[in-house]
Image (tube, helix red, strand yellow):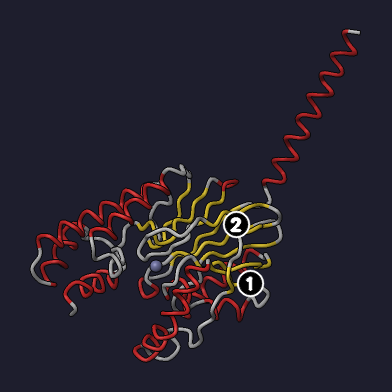
Amino acid sequence: MFILNRRNLLALGVAGAATAMASRLSLAAVADTKVFTADEAGVMVDSTVIVGEKSAIVVDAQFTVANAKALADVIQATGKEVTTILITHYHPDHLLGLSVLLDRFPEAKPLTHPSVLAMINKASAPTLKALTAQAPKGVFPDKLIVPDVLTKDHLLLEGERIEILDPMHGDTEFVTPVHIPSLNTLIAADVGYTDTHLWLEENTTPDQVSKWRDSTRELEAIGAKTVIPGHRKPDSRSDASIFAYTRSYLDSWEKALAASKSADELKAALLKDHPDAGFGFALQRSVAAIYKN
Ligand SMILES: [Zn+2]
């Protein structure tokens, strides 16, 4: 009887182990993320490929044609079918490469949150026109693809939930970070930067800067082990330290704004605090937003 019970217990143990293995296997549907970071000409923007067993979801589509093509090569090397390309916010450095990606992966569905879509409809066509008028032909994609509207708070990758967070204030008003619980990974999008200047054109008031700081704390509280910033240097870390970096840059910005009386002084103060930061174009535009130069 004892042996029988023991056998039963063993059988239960084995059954338990099998169940645990099955649930681990189902969680393994999302196997990995691959991050592509653009060069300085592509404003060091990150795109993330969330890789499943057979398919993949891409988060953000790059800015220039060259960087979007390089991202497409990274995606193609995974050998997975792209189901969705999610755009986290309306800025052209995350959106414009969509036409290049869709040429390569026509089966993919581009999606974005309704608040982001409203901004794209309002701002993106004039921005693309201005960019293509200024740059040599072929640098930027010549057509704007407007994503379809996202109707849920998540995407499914082979049955597994990829959480699309509600829009929060980052370098613009509506940014939708992405949380992948099974990988303990958070794609901060443009709520978190590291080792670059921040795009502050839309954060010129104390209230806006304060909202951005609050968003970094909200994301930090998720406690994800891997945190992918919106902009970085290629060798920067992918962890929660990006939030402290972002807040320290916002501190520098406010201190420099209070102390500077000219564009040159503002620029010099930010460069003094962050001498090695990449994405110099952001610094130029942030200063211009204050001094209209
Ligand atoms: Zn950006």
- Residue 103 percent location from the top left of the image: 61, 81
Circle 1 crowding by C-alpha within 10 Å: few under 14, some 14–19, many from 20: some
Q: Looking at the image, how many numbered discs can be counted on the residues?
A: 2
First in sequence: mark 1 or mark 2?
A: 1
- State the residue position of label 2: 154
For the residues labelled 1 and 2, say whether their Cβ atoms are less than 8 Å apart: no
- Residue 101 percent location from the top left of the image: 57, 76
- Checking the image for residue 46, the label placed there is none
- Looking at the rendered image, the quarter that the N terminus falls into is top right
Residue drawn at x 16%, y 68% is 267
Q: In which quarter of the image is ligand 1?
A: bottom left
Amino acid type, callout 2: His
Q: Which image quadrant for residue 199?
A: bottom left
Residue drawn at x 60%, y 78% is 102
Work out whether residue 117 or residue 264 is closer to the camera in this orientation and state it.
117
- State the residue position of label 1: 109
Question: Is residue 102 in view?
Answer: yes
Foreground: disc 1 or disc 2: 2
Q: Is residue 243 above or below residue 105?
A: above
Residue drawn at x 37%, y 47% is 217
- Looking at the rendered image, the quarter that the C terminus falls into is bottom left
Q: Gap in Å between the C-alphas at discs 1 and 2?
A: 14 Å
Q: Which image quadrant for residue 272?
A: bottom left
Q: Residue pushed farthest top?
A: 2
Q: Is mark 1 on a helix, strand or loop?
A: strand
- Residue 278 percent location from the top left of the image: 30, 65
Amino acid type, callout 1: Lys
- Residue 142 percent location from the top left of the image: 48, 88
